[in-house]
Image (spheres, helix red, strand yellow):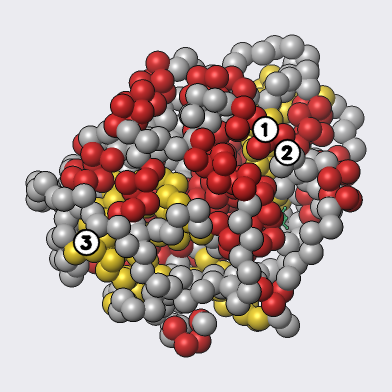
Amino acid sequence: MNKEIKYALEYHQETKHSQMSIRLSNHYLDWDNKPKPFKFYTSIPSTPLPIDFPLPDLNVITMKETNQITALENPKINTELLSSLLFFSSGITRQIKFPHGKYYMRAAPATGALYPIEVYVVSENIDGLHAGVYHFCPGEFSLTRLRGGDYRQFLSEAAGFEQAVKNSPFTIILTSLAWRNAWKYQARSYRHWFWDSGVIIANLIATASSFGLNTKLITGYIDKFVNELLCLEENKEASIVLAPIGIGLSEQEPGKIQHPSRFVPDIVPISHGKEVEYDQIWKLHDASSLNSTDEVRQWVHSIKSMQEVKGIKDDSGKLFTKQIEPIPSNSKPLSEVILLRGSTRKFSREPITFEQLSNILYSIAEPTPSDFGEKKSLIDIYFIANDVTNIQKGAYFFNRKDKSIDLLKVNIRRDMSGYLCLEQSLFSDASAVFYIMSNIKLILDKLGNRGYRLCQFESGILAGRIYLSSYDQKIGASGSTFYDDAVSDFFSPHAKDKDVMIAVGVGVPGYRSKPGRILAGKFSREELL
Ligand SMILES: Cc1cc2nc3c(=O)[nH]c(=O)nc-3n(C[C@H](O)[C@H](O)[C@H](O)COP(=O)(O)O)c2cc1C
C-alpha cells in the first residue's frame, strides 16, 4: 500500500486551504466538546517524576552540527535526566486563564494550543526507574507504567533491528491522539500530527545535545507493533517517531522478550460528547504504514539510495546571491531560551538584522540525525523579507548547501506575506516569513506514502529550530498555516512543483512578555480534569 501514492496525493489536495475553501467551510468549534489536553489512565497509578532535575545549560542552538558536540564525560543516566528531557520538550511552562477555561502552555508550540502529541518512554533499568514502557503526563509531571520489563529488543526488532534502540538506555516515542487536533482542524489535522511532533523533537534534540547525549530519529518501523507496545487505541491514536536517547550509553544488553500482549487501558474520556473520526486521516495513515520487517528494510533501503533532493540548484529567475553571515549569539543557557519561547502574538514592524536572519538560516541549514538521512533533507526553504537590514525587501530562496540566499522577486507589498498565511495580519507585520516547501511528488515517487509523513515532520523540526534560534536572539516567532497553492504560485517559477509544508514568521515582538517557568509538579489531576 505504501507504494500507492495516490493516497497521499489525494489527501494533500483535498486538505489544501484556499480562499474559497475557507469561505465555504461551515465547520464551527463545539466548545462544550473541546478535548481535554491530558491523558489520564483510570486504573493504572501514576508516579511523580523528580522536579529537581538538571537544566540543559549548554546552548547548542547555533552550533553547526548539534549531534556532533563532545559528549559530557559520562552523563549520568537517571530519572532526573529523563525528567529534564521530558520537561524541556513538552513540560508546562505557563498557565493562562481565558473566559472559556485554562490553558497549560508548553515548552514547544502546538497548533491551536491543542497539544495532540503524547509522549512515551521505553526504558532499561536506570537509576530511579525500573525497566518498562511508560506514558508521560506533562500535567501531573508523572509517569504511568504500562508494562514492566525491558522492551528495547522488541522495539529494535520492530524498527528493522535498529541498533540505536538497543544500545540507548531509553527511547522516547511520540504519538498523536487524533481527535484532540481534529476537533478544530478536521482532516487537515493529519498534517499537524507531524508539525506538532516536529517542534517537540527540535526541543528534545537540543536538550539531549546540551547534555551531550546523541539521538537519532527513527521513522521506519512496523507501526502496529509499536502502537500495540504503547497500548494505543486503534484508529484513535498512533505513533509517529522513535527517538533513542544517549546512543551507545546503555549498560545492559536487552534480553529477548515475548511479543507484548494486546491491551488498551481505560482512560478518562478526552471529550464529553462525540468524537468525530476523519476517514481521510486513517486512510492515509494506514496507506503509509509499514507492516513487516521486509517493508521496514525496503523503506530504509529506498531512503539510503535516494539522491539528494534538497536545494536543487536552480538559477532561474535569480536576481542576486548573497552569503549568509551568522555570528555567535550571546548564548543564553538553552533552558532560558526554551522558557522564553512562546508564539509572538504581535510583531512591532521593526526590522531584524541580517545577522539575526543568518543565524536563523544557519540553525536550519543542517539535516537532522535520523534514519531519513544523516546528510539528506526533503525540504527547501523560501522566505519573504519584509524588513531585514542590509538586504532588499523581496522573496528569497535559501541554498542550504552553499549557505547563501538568492533574491527571486522584488517589489513585494508587505501584506503579501500575511495574505499567504491565510490573511493573518500577524504575518504581514513579521520582519521575515519562512515558507518551508517540498517537492512531495518527487519524494512520494521514491518513498511512497510514508514520504508524506516525513516531509511534514522534517518541516516541523525546522519550524521548531526557527523558534529556538529566534528566541535565542531575543526576537520572536510564530508558526502559521497558509493558502497552499497561493504560496507555490508566489514562489514560482523557482518553486514550480513544490508544496508548502509550514510557514513561520519572525520579528521583533510588539510587547514585553514574561518568560515561562518550570511548572513541573505544580498541578494535581483534580485540577487538570
Ligand atoms: C506549525 C504551527 C502552526 C501555527 N499556526 C498558527 C497560525 O496560523 N496562526 C497563529 O496565530 N498561531 C499559529 N501557531 C501558534 C500556536 O497557536 C501556538 O503555538 C499555541 O497557541 C501555543 O502557544 P505558544 O507557542 O505560545 O506556547 C502555530 C504554531 C505551530 C507550531
For residue 113, what is the image quadrant?
bottom right
Instruction: Look at discs 3 and 2 and give the one toward the viewer.
Output: 2
Q: Residue 224's spot in the image, x, y percent?
A: 37, 45
Q: How far apart are the two marked residues, 3 and 2, measured between alpha carbons?
A: 41 Å
**Label 3 crowd bin: few (<14), some (14–19), many (20+), radius 10 Å:** many
Q: How far apart are the two marked residues, 3 and 1, measured between alpha carbons?
A: 40 Å
Q: Residue 339's spot in the image, x, y percent?
A: 51, 65
Secondary structure at badge 2 equals helix
Looking at the image, is 215 positioned above or below residue 371? below
**Label 2 crowd bin: few (<14), some (14–19), many (20+), radius 10 Å:** few
Q: Which badge, 3 or 2, is on the more N-terminal residue?
A: 2
Dot 1 corresponds to which residue?
A: 10
Q: Which mark is residue 14?
A: 2
Q: Is residue 89 visible?
A: no
Nearer to the camera, 499 or 387: 499
Marks 1 & 2, CB-CB < 8 Å contact:
yes
**Residue farthest to the bottom, as pictured:** 526
Residue at image position (16%, 60%) is: 149
Q: Residue 394's spot in the image, x, y percent?
A: 80, 31
- Left or right, 254 with respect to 327, comes to left
- Left or right, 114 with respect to 382, comes to left
- Left or right, 456 with respect to 263, comes to right
Q: How far apart are the two marked residues, 1 and 2, measured between alpha carbons?
A: 6 Å
